[in-house]
Image: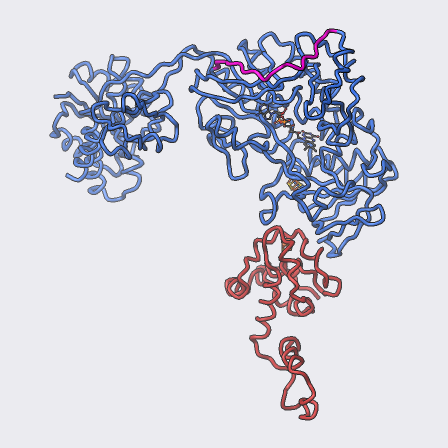
Chain colours: A blue, B red
Amino acid sequence: MKRIGVFICHCGINIAGTVDIEKLTSQIKEYPNVVHVENYKYMCSSPGQQLINQQIMDKNLDAVVVAACSPSLHENTFRTSVQRVEMNPYNCEIANIREQCSWVHDDKQIATDKAAKIIKSMVEKTVLDEPLMPITVPVNRKALVIGGGVAGMQAALNIANNGYEVILVERESSIGGHMAMLSETFPTLDCSQCILTPKMVEVDQHPNITLITYSEVVEVSGFVGNFKVKIKQKAKYVDWEKCNGCGDCITECPINTPSEFEQQLGERHAIYRPFPQAVPNKVIVDMDECIQCMVCQVFCPTDAIDFNQKDSIVEQEVGAIVLATGYQLYSLKNLPEYGGGEIEDVIDGLAFERLLSASGPTQGVVKRPSDGKIPQDVVFIQCAGSRDPENHMPYCSRICCMYTAKHAMLYKHRVHQGRAYIFYMDIRSGGKDYEEFVQRVMEEERVVYLRGKVSRLYEEDGKVVVCGTDTLTRRNVEIKADLVVTATPIRPIEDIDQLSKLFKISINQNGFLTEAHPKLRPVESLTSGIYLAGCAQAPRDIPDTVAQASGAASMVCALFSSDQLYHDPIIAGVDEDLCSGCGICVGVCPYSARTLNREKGIVEVNEVLCEACGACSAACPSGAAQQRNFTDIQLKNMVKAILG
Amino acid sequence: MNNKLTLENIQQFDLDEFQEISGENIFACYQCGNCSAGCPAADFMDLAPHEVIRLLQLGQIDEVVKTNTVWICAACVTCRVRCPKGVDLSKIMEAVRQIVLRKKNNYVDLNKIESELREKLPQIALVGNFRKFTL
Ligand SMILES: Cc1cc2nc3c(=O)[nH]c(=O)nc-3n(C[C@H](O)[C@H](O)[C@H](O)COP(=O)(O)OP(=O)(O)OC[C@H]3O[C@@H](n4cnc5c(N)ncnc54)[C@H](O)[C@@H]3O)c2cc1C
Ligand code: SF4
Ligand code: SF4
């Protein structure tokens, strides 16, 4: 027989006000297995804890039930406390007679009876509780960061500066992401390249960071502290060990093709680097464009060109992963009302960034794509596909109000006589110094803000005729513009579905990665050991991206701060004698903790992945899946105690 | 003269009934004005289409009824096609017309039209008469 002690807390008058403590104490005294019952004003106080520990020793107790508040408050307190007198913490249970009893009742009689039932049922559970030891797992203190935009770079640098190794995988040949494309950044108008390039170089030269660009993760297995990944390095057709980035090959290459980095507004060659400040400063060959004339080979001073190069796979083991895959813009092709991408002088925000950029295709002179003329009337359209649940994206893209104001201001700085018109529905300028920035654009730049949507636009006589409305004056507006810039929605990357499957993390209805808790755990995914940063999780500006990336990095560092991980031992196991190998539990486990071993014909559990949700125990037809200390027999006895 | 909005008149008409007649949730509208921007008849209306919804959101149906807008609306449904919130404004216009029509105020008495003239009038003109000249 187990020797159980029950300790009833008054919680001041919180419990004692509605529950007759003395009566309760005498009722519980009679219950089987209970050898000691005692009550006290505040059990969680230090004398309260001492009282329990004293009785454990004096009465030689095997287990205790503390009848008090919700276990979410003090389970940890009491379990830690009993360990001081050598009791296994899992032999200490909480009977919740406050939130589930005294707080919700007025009638003392009923509340007292109910409290007795709650305690008895917990005693029944405790009778069959096993002593458990936390599951320990070693931690591989090396991090993998996926995506080399500003989010990924920030996370990598923070982790590396804490002394841990980082592998940074970027799919393009250079890191930098979208920030490298921006001209100047709101609200301070610092030059984007100027603040980013030093960071890129720091990443490249950091002794703790291994940069693997032009690569993608293709396989992931394992769990927190112990992930195994396979990284595919795409063939570059250039031996990067030899390439010194001199660019002689680029100048000689006869092929010209639209540059992705310049948003098709400029050209690149078949052998190229996306932009001159690329990091690493190395070139790659675009095989779709290359005609194999071998000119590059002739001019390369280091004999780096290698047309026989193949894709290769590298394997890595890491303890934590940060996903920072960023965003793409919703294509204008999806917006037939705004020309569907067919009208040359209707462009998106990133293209306009390139037109404003001093290192862009027009050296920072704003020229319109169709004929290179300097536009005199420019129309900006906000929410061009955002906040449109009927036809496009339902959500607000959050940064376009600000970058549109910035675009109008920079345009006015470049073209002094030019006129800028912004169609908007609302101005969302909630960041630090953002509202002041927008007000400056209105007051000092005299940009014409028109409150309403553009219903359509069309090309006529070398102009783009924009038909919209100004709801504030209830007048319809027609502007014959030279150039139209649309603020199209921020979307997750094209292949976000595959990414979410690969890493087994969820995405929301719009494809953005889902955080573990929208308020309290914003940088963690639901899979332990995988963290989120930047626009992959939701549209956001650079300051928020960097802050979130630092947050993710500090979570990684916290994980790495010890060489062992402890996992709660309350997990669902498999009784090998009972398991029929039907595999039903494998499908219902949301954490992929269970796998079917076909050879043995039974299911096996990865204890570290199990989060003890109990789905398998409920689903198992043969009773083989039992959650530790929540077994079927225990639950049955608990129910009996309550009904009886 | 426009009414000042006060506690006495904000949303003081039966919105549920209006929703039932129109089948539309007028509160889905966030006043982007796309309906007005695309409406081929907007230039002839006293109130722009989006203003009709705004006044209805505030319960000012009497003000809507005073204007020519719902009678100018040709029910071409361009607004419905363009609305990013999926609001069918043409149904809302129709609902306002229905509310007026259901009051059954006839301003033209058929019996007072000379029988000779009545013979000549096409059917459609008589129907149109009842639908539109009831204010
Ligand atoms: C027109 C425009 C103007 C803007 N102006 C400003 C401004 O003035 N100020 C401001 O604060 N913000 C501005 N922003 C917002 C800014 O661009 C973002 O906040 C920032 O770039 C987000 O960084 P990120 O690292 O999350 O994403 P990204 O910059 O998109 O970086 C993601 C990186 O991950 C890589 N990647 C993607 N998938 C994979 C994969 N599977 N494997 C490996 N690598 C992958 C990508 O190649 C990319 O390099 C602007 C945005 C736009 C569209
Ligand atoms: S940030 Fe502004 S422009 Fe962009 S979707 Fe939101 S409200 Fe529209
Ligand atoms: S288009 Fe739709 S959302 Fe916009 S003002 Fe008209 S009814 Fe309202």
All told, the count of numbered labels is: 0
Residue A486 lies left or right of residue A638; in this view the side is right
Q: Residue at point 24% right, 15% down?
A: A87
Quarter of the picture containing the N terminus of chain B is bottom right
Quarter that holds the C terminus of chain B: bottom right
Q: Note whether residue A136 is visible.
A: yes
**x, y percentage for residue B108?**
65, 84
Relative to the observer, which residue lies in front, A61 or A491? A491
Residue A427 sits in which quadrant?
top right
Q: Quadrant of ligand 2?
A: top right
Q: Nearer the viewer, residue A480 or A8?
A: A480
The residue at 50%/14% (across/down) is A315
Please say if A597 is above or below A121: above
Q: Residue A222: x percent and y percent?
A: 42, 19
**Is residue A518 found left or right of A429 in the rendered image?**
left
Do we see residue A11 in this rendering? no
- Where residue B72 sits, quadrant-wise, is bottom right
Q: Is residue A254 magenta?
A: no
Along the horizontal axis of the image, is A640 left or right of B75? left
Q: Relative to A79, does residue A515 appear above or below in the rendering?
A: below
Residue A178 location in percent, x, y?
Answer: 67, 27
Tell me what residue is drawn at x 43 percent, y 13 percent: A139
Name the residue at the bottom extreme.
B115
**Residue at 31% across / 33% down in the picture?**
A584
Write down the region rendered in magenta. A302-318
